[in-house]
Image (tube, rainbow, N blue to C red):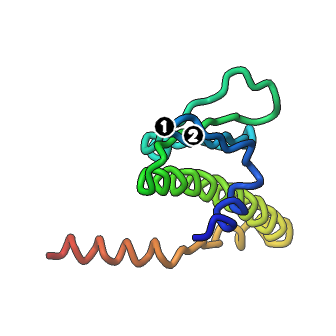
């Protein structure tokens, strides 16, 4: 990935990048509604800037100026951003699907609504696999 690609991906949340002796500090501001899973953050050195009074969370990520460590840091930041963007998209889709269901419930009779089945193909495949394991 080029430097431009990295900066472009981080840019909406990027506050600053600083040199601290042999370390690199990446300061970022994330929306207030974002989550910060420990499974992602425990891989890197990250601290919240408690003095920040603006909207969102101000996090400071620090890494030694070492290619592997810096790549791990950038990967973790990318994982954090991707996790939250996917979460936002899933929430939007859920709201759309709930609205679709509301419309179906308005138009259908009680008996029709009682017989509505919601199927998820991947869950059915998992159930089939579990059934096969139980048979063995």
Percent across and percent down for residue 128 are: 34, 77
Above or below, comparing residue 115 to residue 71 in the picture:
below
Q: How many marks?
A: 2
Which residue is found at the position 44% from the left and 51% from the top?
66
Which residue is found at the position 18% from the left and 75% from the top?
135
Percent across and percent down for residue 33 are: 72, 41
* Residue positioned most to the left: 136
Which residue is found at the position 63% from the left and 72% from the top?
115
Q: Which residue is mark 2?
A: 61
Disc 2 to disc 1, how far (Cα)? 6 Å
Q: Quadrant of the N terminus?
A: bottom right
Identify the mark at residue 45; answer none if there is no mark: 1
Quarter-wise, where is residue 105 in the image? bottom right
Above or below, comparing residue 19 to residue 98 in the picture:
above
Viewer-proximal residue, 37 or 12? 12
Please tell me whether mark 1 sits on a helix, a strand or a loop. Answer: strand
Identify the mark at residue 54; answer none if there is no mark: none
């Amino acid at each position: 990935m080029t430097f431009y690609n990295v900066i472009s991906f981080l840019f909406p949340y990027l506050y600053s990048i600083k040199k601290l002796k042999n370390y690199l500090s990446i300061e970022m501001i994330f929306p207030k509604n974002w989550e910060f899973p420990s499974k992602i953050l425990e891989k890197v050195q990250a601290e919240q800037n408690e003095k920040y009074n603006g909207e969102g969370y101000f996090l400071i990520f620090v890494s030694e100026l070492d290619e592997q460590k810096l790549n791990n840091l950038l990967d973790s930041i990318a994982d954090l951003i991707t996790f939250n963007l996917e979460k936002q998209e899933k929430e939007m889709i859920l709201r759309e699907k709930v609205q679709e269901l509301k419309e179906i419930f308005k138009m259908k009779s009680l008996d029709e609504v009682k017989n509505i089945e919601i199927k998820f193909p991947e869950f059915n495949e998992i159930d089939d696999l579990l059934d096969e394991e139980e048979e063995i």
